[in-house]
Image: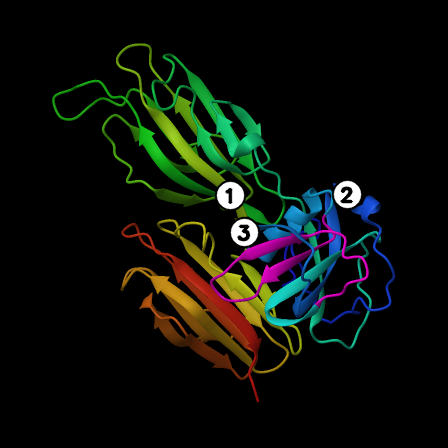
Amino acid sequence: MAVGDSRYRLYLYITCFVSLSGRGPINTAAMAHRDRGKFFLRKYYVLDSHVLFTMQVRSMLDCVSMCLSEENCTSINYSGIPGTKDCQINGDPGNDTATPNEDWNHAVLISEPLSTEPPPTTDPLTTVVQATTMKQAPGGVVNGTCGNFSYEAEAVMTKGYPDATPKSFSCDQIFQAPVGRRVYIIVDDIGMYGSPKLFGKNCDDKWKFHDGQVSSSENLVVKICGNDGLTTPAYFLSSGQSFLGRLTTVESGDSSRGVKYSVRFVEDICGTTIEVPPKGQVNFTSPGYGIGKLPHNFQCDITVTSPSPLRLTFPKFDLEFLWDKLSVYDGPSDASLRLSLLYGVKDGVYFTAQEGTLFLRLTTDSGVYSSGFYATAEEEPE
């Protein structure tokens, strides 16, 4: 997949690369606390007996990013079983080497400077991964702080949540994702005060989400005030790298409970072309898959290409029946022949393209939230 800025994206290069045999000892001191790094990835291998700790992650990119932030990490083991996302952080292996295991993938952090072109190899199961650390809020929490943030957060809360927000108060919380990623929001709880009127309540205290760094009527995603309800959890995705949350309260009346939400930076797969390497495989998901649900009123176009006949399989597929849909086209655009219109649960469904290109268009409505899909693209087996 060759999309985005190489400083922030995971690259599985189209050609294959040299294995680690004969490369000599790893300089662990040179690798500590690097902001970015290069890994050699070997599919279906695992390093045993050197695991520092194991954690659940959302993707291999998150796993190698965690390795970069750990001082003693020299490599990772990442579970290759669909549906599991175990990440093992490994320490210095000494003279031990990884051994074959069909359920795992092993990636070793190397200390050489990043290069624009990787070295050639004849090993079809070895690739190069480049990544950066994915920053987290201190303790995973942003508690009542206003301003700009360039990291993810397990919990973001407005000031005073959940007891009472300040009166005559205004606060902007702006999240900026790295290049090649979007801001994914999950709203867990929200409560805004509205003074009584004849029908319902007035719009007094307000919460707004804007798709971008500034507030305008053109990029307003949602406004919650008075008795305007928002069913939680609710899911939002930026169209670019930034998302703005704005709280404003009035002087009179009761205090609002406030807002609690989480922030993730997810891969910007929409509008990209996924390239399958010769004899290789690429796994990808719909935005937010495994973290939450797809946002409402959303469209995402993805092109998948291969140098030979292509097979695209969906081991996991779940879209709201009839209303959320995935259109699959045999060719590079929606002007190509449509092979299928998918919705509902369709685990295991697959498609082939003899010319090596499939175009996908995912759309959602404003009804029920859908889980999305996990997909595997590879050359059509002979």
Q: Residue 163 occupies which quadrant of the picture?
A: top left
In the rendered view, tell whether residue 305 sits above or below residue 86.
below
Residue, disc 2? 32
Identify the residue at horizontal 83%, vertical 44% (top origin): 29
Which one is in front in this view, the residue at disc 1 or the one at disc 3? 3
In this orientation, does residue 8 appear?
no
Give left or right: position of 184 versus 196.
right
Q: Position of residue 180 (x, y in %)?
A: 61, 50
Queried whether the magenta region covers residue 351, the answer comes back as no
Q: Secondary structure at mark 1?
A: strand
Percent across and percent down for residue 367 are 27, 51
Q: Amino acid at mark 1?
A: Arg
Residue displayed at 81% across by 71% down: 120
Q: Earlier in the sequence, mark 1 or mark 2?
A: 2
Disc 3 secondary structure class: loop
Rendered image: mark on residue 264: 1
Instruction: Give the extent of the magenta segment.
Output: 73-98
Residue placed at 62% from the left, 39% from the top?
135
Q: Amino acid at mark 3?
A: Val
Reply above or below: 183 against 360.
above
**What separation in Å lies between label 3 and label 2 (alpha carbons)?**
21 Å
Mark 2 is surrounded, within 10 Å at the Cα level, by few (under 14), some (14 to 19) or many (20 or more) other residues, namely some
Q: Quadrant of residue 160?
A: top left
Name the residue tied to disc 3.
Answer: 57
Q: Is residue 273 left or right of residue 108?
A: left
Q: Nearer the viewer, residue 376 or 125?
A: 125
